[in-house]
Image (cartoon, rainbow, N blue to C red):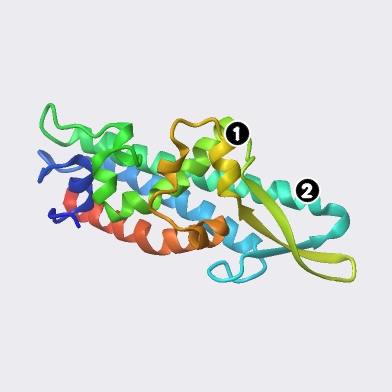
Amino acid sequence: MSSYEYEIQTLYGADVVPSSSLSRSATTRLTAAKRVLDQNYYEIEQYIDGELETNPVYICPEDSREDAGFEVLRLLHNYLSSLYSFNETIRVIFNQNTEQGVELTSGSFTPASGGTRSSFYGRKLSFLRGLRTDFQHGGFSCLSFEKVGELGTFAGYHVEFDSETFVQNSGLHDPERFLRYTNDNEQKYPLCFIEQFHTGPLQGFYGEVEEWFE
């Protein structure tokens, strides 16, 4: 467990405090990054027919299952991209509002960093960072669409994650590091994981960041 009051301090690795208050422009950028992330989450939530938390199934006509699958991937990609941008916004604003030489790097939010190993937010984030990086390099190779039921010309599908494919085919350096802080059950349904992450660790981290900057 971290000994620091705020997780952003844990990500940096020291009990740092802001050297200046946020400008109006910085506040707007931070708020905008969070709103874009929220909007992409809501679009996933609206597209999924089942309960996102427990049964993230989407229903579509059998003859349009490919188009429906592509739409799920698009929404997932948008969320992960906006999550990356959200973290980058925090990183840049942190660096602009702390003493010279006190800087977060992009690596501060990856599981290879010491901060992530002790930051609850960073540990949960690591799986989603792995998905985003695989999407960039492996083209969604670790995901599959599994039919879970049908009614007439309609069928329901889950998006499932395959850790073995991710490790073997992602082409990432040490891909296991992205899986280190989640188990097979958490990883199996990425959309379910996103719901738990967005409504839990993400909201808590954002609230802490706002408080830390005040």
Compared to residue 28, the image places residue 187 above or below, namely below
- The image's mark for residue 67 is 2
The picture places residue 113, in percent across and down from the top left corner, at 28, 38
Seen at 12% across and 27% down, the residue is: 100
Count neighbours of disc 2 (C-alpha within 10 A) and say few if under 14, some if 14 to 19, many if 20 or more.
Answer: few
Q: Quadrant of residue 108?
A: top left
The picture places residue 155, in percent across and down from the top left corner, at 80, 65
Compared to residue 207, the image places residue 113 above or below, namely above
Asked whether residue 19 is in view, the answer is yes
The picture places residue 36, in percent across and down from the top left corner, at 47, 48
Compared to residue 52, the image places residue 8 above or below, namely above
- Amino acid carrying label 2: it is Asp
Residue pointed to by mark 1: 138
Looking at the image, which is closer to me, 212 or 131? 131
Q: Quadrant of residue 12?
A: top left
Viewed as shown, does residue 73 lie left or right of 9? right
Seen at 63% across and 40% down, the residue is: 140
